[in-house]
Amino acid sequence: MQQATIQIVRPVSCANPSAAPQRWEVSQIEALFELPFNELLYQAQTVHRANFDPAEVQLSTLLSIKTGGCAENCSYCPQSSAYDTGVEATALMKVDAVLEAARAAQAAGATRFCMGAAWRGPKDRDIEKVSALISAVKGLGLETCATLGMLGDGHAETLRDAGLDYYNHNIDSAPDKYGDIVQTRQFEDRLDTLQRVRGAGVKVCCGGIVGMGESRTQRAALIAELANMEPYPESVPINHLVQVEGTPLHGTEVLDPFEFVRTIAAARITMPHTRVRLSAGRQALGEAVQALCFMAGANSIFYGDKLLVTGNPDVTADQALLKKLGMRAA
Ligand code: SAM
Ligand code: DTB
Ligand code: SF4
């Protein structure tokens, strides 16, 4: 029988991470998506094993420290004040309540605590308050992450000095899709904040959402945009759209789960050293698809019964899943 010849699109080993970064063309990433599924997973797993212990998964817990009432109109988001989703707006949480949640996350096994605020961007006085939350959480010995929207002058430096390890700011989609999903800001605004974070020496957590009705080329372009950042983000959350009633994207045709797994694999191959996080949408994916995502190189999850306002698999269910798969917390 004749064997199919499979082209390895890019060398899979990363023997010299200090070498000049190579630019990924969108067409090269599309070529990855077009590989036979098992071949793509094999390549992704090979890259993964060259750089990580494939049994380890990093656990990050999210807390919404300021919920709802957001001025932006992101068409996927239940926290935008532009849509009627039943999410109630709340004020910024106080330090004691945040510490209680952080202690519980740590006791359950999380190593990183990510605080999210439904802001277009924080004001100077918000930065002071969030800095106090960051210092308190850092004091517990957890890694800290915050996602507060667009940052202004000096914000990233103040957050860094308070003990911020990571700042999450997603580009969310391919540049040519962005205008379809958000109209209250530009793609370039996201890049500006990412530059401020990098410039302050805070680690970058940046990813996107798939399943928003984008084309495969646009999924490849999202991954290219991330992989071509210099350097690429330390942490890359790949979210599967959580469809929330009342948001414009509710009712979007659901993405084929294999396409989601392919996106994870493409992220792993193009960003060999990053933590690829299997992020929002795990409830809908089910255990078998999640296992394929780990096979494709995902090595981080959001861990905790809630994301920001929507659900996430229970901690006990995740612990059972990791046990069944012979995986453990990093
Ligand atoms: N307001 C800040 C911002 O937009 O950067 C921080 C919070 S915002 C909720 C953080 C990220 O959550 C978004 O960039 C998006 O990637 C993700 N997100 C929001 N709603 C989502 C949904 N329904 N499904 C999947 N991901 C979602
Ligand atoms: C990220 O990439 N996903 C998280 C986190 N960063 C902040 C948020 C997911 C939100 C899912 C819908 C919700 O619960 O609001
Ligand atoms: Fe606001 Fe962030 Fe939701 Fe957009 S994604 S509406 S900026 S909370």
Image (cartoon, grey):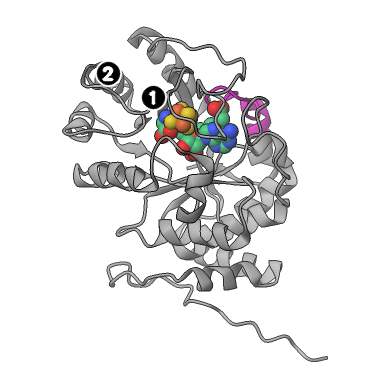
Please say if 227 is above or below 240. below
User: What residue sits 22% from the left and 16% below the top?
Assistant: 125
Q: Give coordinates of residue 74: x percent, y percent.
A: 50, 34
Residue labelled 1 has its Cβ within 8 Å of some atom of ligand 1: yes
Amino acid found under the numbered disc labelled 2: Asp
Q: Does the magenta stretch include residue 80?
A: no
Q: Main secondary structure of the magenta part?
A: loop
Q: Which residue lies furthest to the right in this view?
A: 1
Between 315 and 107, the residue placed more toward the observer is 315
Label 2, residues with CA under 10 Å away: few <14, some 14-19, many ≥20 = few
State if disc 1 and disc 2 touch (CB < 8 Å): yes
Q: What stretch is highlighted in magenta?
A: 302-320
Circle 1 — which element? loop
Q: Mark 2 points at which residue?
A: 126
The answer to whether residue 316 is visible is yes
Amino acid found under the numbered disc labelled 1: Trp
Q: Does the magenta stretch include residue 319?
A: yes
User: What residue sits 45% from the left and 54% below the top?
Assistant: 175
Which badge, 2 or 1, is on the more N-terminal residue?
A: 1
Residue labelled 2 has its Cβ within 8 Å of some atom of ligand 1: no
Left or right: residue 212 compared with residue 204? right
Circle 2 — which element? helix
Please say if 110 is above or below 94. below
User: What residue sits 54% from the left and 55% below the top?
Assistant: 54
Determine the CA span between mark 2 and mark 1.
10 Å
Q: Give coordinates of residue 159: x percent, y percent.
A: 23, 29
Between 96 and 251, the residue placed more toward the observer is 251
Q: Mark 1 points at which residue?
A: 119
The answer to whether residue 111 is visible is no
Left or right: residue 177 compared with residue 292? left
Say which quadrant the N terminus sits in. bottom right
In which image quadrant can residue 242 be found? Answer: top right
